[in-house]
Amino acid sequence: MTIKIGLIGVLILTIISLSCFVHARTDLPIQPKSQKKAVRVLYRKNEILPKPPVTIHVEYHGKMKDYTVPQDTVGNTLNRLHIQLGKTDVMGWELSDMITDDQMIVISKIEYKEETREEIIPFETEKIKADDMLIGETKIVQQGQNGLKSCIYQNSYFNDRPWHSFKKSESIITPAVNEVIKTGTQNILEIQNVDLKNEDSVLLKTKVDDANFKLPQVKLSEHDRDLLERLLTGEFGGSFTGAALVAQAIKCAIVYDHYTSMDNLIIGMGYVGDTDCKSQNAVDAAKFIFDENALAVKHRLFYMCTEDYYNSDPGNFHSTQNFILQYENVKFFDRW
């Protein structure tokens, strides 16, 4: 039986034959399929992919250096760069952190060391009040001595440079001894039981002289001495004798009325003389009456006024007091 095959049938048979032939050759590579299979393997699960390079900046113990490395964890990157962290190194990143491009990694070294030092203990000054001394006068009654102590410090070093230090403990080797100073509290101080030489140093004699009259020596503070000299200048500073008479009246007020400061005495005794300046006569008169313990007259003196004032006001206070003498135009009085 003869089978007739047309042109179309021939083409179909040819294609079928070729297909069977190709499948029968298993040793020939099929490139399209093989390449497609390799791409799938690169993205298979748990497969390590290629890491892109990044630039990082590492400051290690104060020294900076730049590196280009594959992107990885901080720990792996340091291992790759052969940088090992010491026991005293500190870093602001975890070893498991992933590095990023242009990242700064700072590794600093902080060390702690103990140090023992001996230190001076400065003595302190203790002041005690003394009512037998004038204001401004001082006297050391116990010399001060420095002590000694042993101190333990913990010092920290940042990248080998001193950074911080604090005292952990201290112990006393030798205690300090305080200095003790007596400081005067009195403005005016009477000193009794001294050799009084009033009878040998009298400026003026009067008909009412008291042969037994004496005054104790009186010491003044620097402030009161300055104020006395200024007051004497304002009251009778043009004359040494006149200033000495006023100085004796002031001294009598201190001794008999127990004034303890020139400020209070001026108010209590009613002195109105200017105190803006001082004359040499006043300075010398103050020294004569207070330092040399001399007398202007051998009698108590308390009050004074000018002759013009005395005559202009009959029955004034001064006229009721015990008149002792007049020097130039000034009258001086004791009280009855």
Image (tube, grey):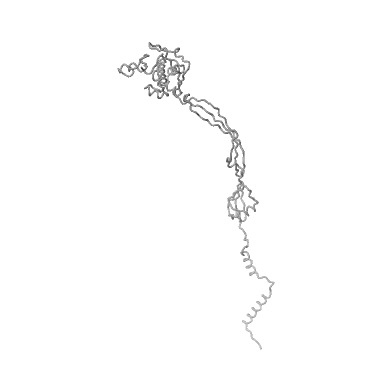
Residue furthest to the bottom: 1
For residue 241, what is the image quadrant? top left
Of residues 283 and 92, which is closer to you in this image? 283
The quadrant of the rendering that contains the C terminus is top left
Up/down of 270 relative to 21, above or below:
above
Residue furthest to the right: 27
Of residues 69 and 286, which is closer to you in this image? 286
Residue 29 x, y percent position in the rendering: 67, 70
The quadrant of the rendering that contains the N terminus is bottom right
Of residues 200 and 163, which is closer to you in this image? 200
Residue 180 x, y percent position in the rendering: 53, 28
Residue 57 x, y percent position in the rendering: 60, 50
* Total number of numbered discs in the rendering: 0
Up/down of 236 relative to 90, above or below:
above
Of residues 165 and 41, which is closer to you in this image? 165
Residue 307 x, y percent position in the rendering: 34, 16
